[in-house]
Amino acid sequence: MTARLVTVFGGNGFVGRHVVQRLAKTGARVRVAARDPESALFLRPLGTPGQIVTVKANITDKDEVARAVEGSDAVINCAGVLTPSGWNDFLGVHKSGSAILAKAVKAAGIKTLVHVSALNADSKSDSAYLKSKGEGETALLSAFPNATVLRPSVIVGAEDNFMNLYAKIARWSPVIPMINPIFSSIKMVRSELFGFLVPTLDPRPLEGSTFQPVVVADVAEAVVKALDDSNAKGQIYDVVGPTAYTFKKLMFMMLEASGREACVVSYPASWAYFWAFFLEFVPGKPFTCDMVTVLNNHNLPSGDNKGLADLGVQAHSLESVLPSFLNTYRPPSNRRLRPV
């Protein structure tokens, strides 16, 4: 019996490479669709000879997408961008690309499509990233209602752009910046005494926003589990870790795991927007105004969607994985070959 063929868009990315490796372990044949297929050649040794192949396919090109999904038994979409660059902007990749892919999958007669989105994706979000992710979900589900949508929180792992970014900052800076709003947010709450709405302050402690990070291996396992779960079709899953942390707590955990010392200092969001504006002109865009918007808001599951447990995935704690990949940031005199 011929092993099933799974096409993975964005398989050479941070999440995609873990998905490809896990698929290869199940014995599936994997076709990695990427804008630059040569950038995905490092994935081929993860499987047996010929098990993993690469093809050229820009998710915004209808013809290339149609050729890439042809003959597939299932399709996974891990394509995404954290910072827009040239033609690869948020709306092009997240919205238009998702719609093009869903229509191609439907036209090819493929029954299974798993889409990796983002936690709190919403077409009404203040963040351009989360707004485009929300619009992408809507476009994808309109064309392919039986698609499975996974919404991961902040993803951590050896190649992530979160913990690794701040560990690099801690290498040369004695200060770790933490974003906080200037004023407490104001909410309208109905008074129990008078029965009408009154303004109340919603104070936020100077510990930053709250996140519920998930380990990249758990995200990859959830993607693969969703392929074989018939109950997952047409469902949306919030993919988060077992514990919520404030930004300040995450930074202290990073410093401990990397063996570095630094002060975590709170700055108003207005200052962060000011510096992010200039950093957007730096090649690679290490920090953007949209990142400030994301970091300045809580990133927690809504409670309305299913979670990892519904896919049979037991989430790993952040404490169990941080030392394994942040150990490399330790000073040479304080570095251990194996975390203890």
Image (spheres, helix red, strand yellow):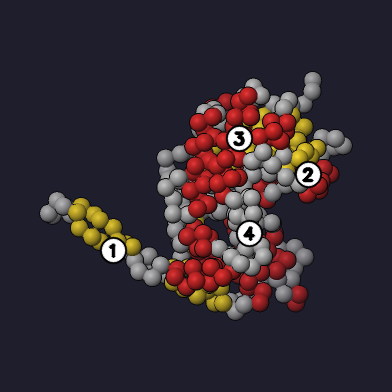
Residue sitting at x 57%, y 25%: 230
Earlier in the chain: of badge 4 and badge 3, it is 3
Left or right of 40? Residue 128 is left
Marking on residue 161: 4
Between residue 69 and residue 265, name the one nearer to us: 69
Discs 2, 4 touching: Cβ within 8 Å:
no
Q: Amino acid at mark 1?
A: Leu
Q: Amino acid at mark 4?
A: Asn
Label 2 packing within 10 angstroms: few (<14), some (14-19), many (20+): some
Question: Whole-percent x and y of residue 196?
Answer: 16, 52
Label 1 to label 2: alpha-carbon separation: 52 Å
**Image quadrant assignment for residue 95:** top right
Label 2 to label 4: alpha-carbon separation: 22 Å
Residue sitting at x 63%, y 29%: 104
Which residue is denoted by mark 2 in the rendering? 37
Between residue 102 and residue 243, name the one nearer to us: 102
Image mark count: 4
Vertical placement of residue 7 versus 39, above or below: above
Which residue is denoted by mark 3 in the rendering? 100
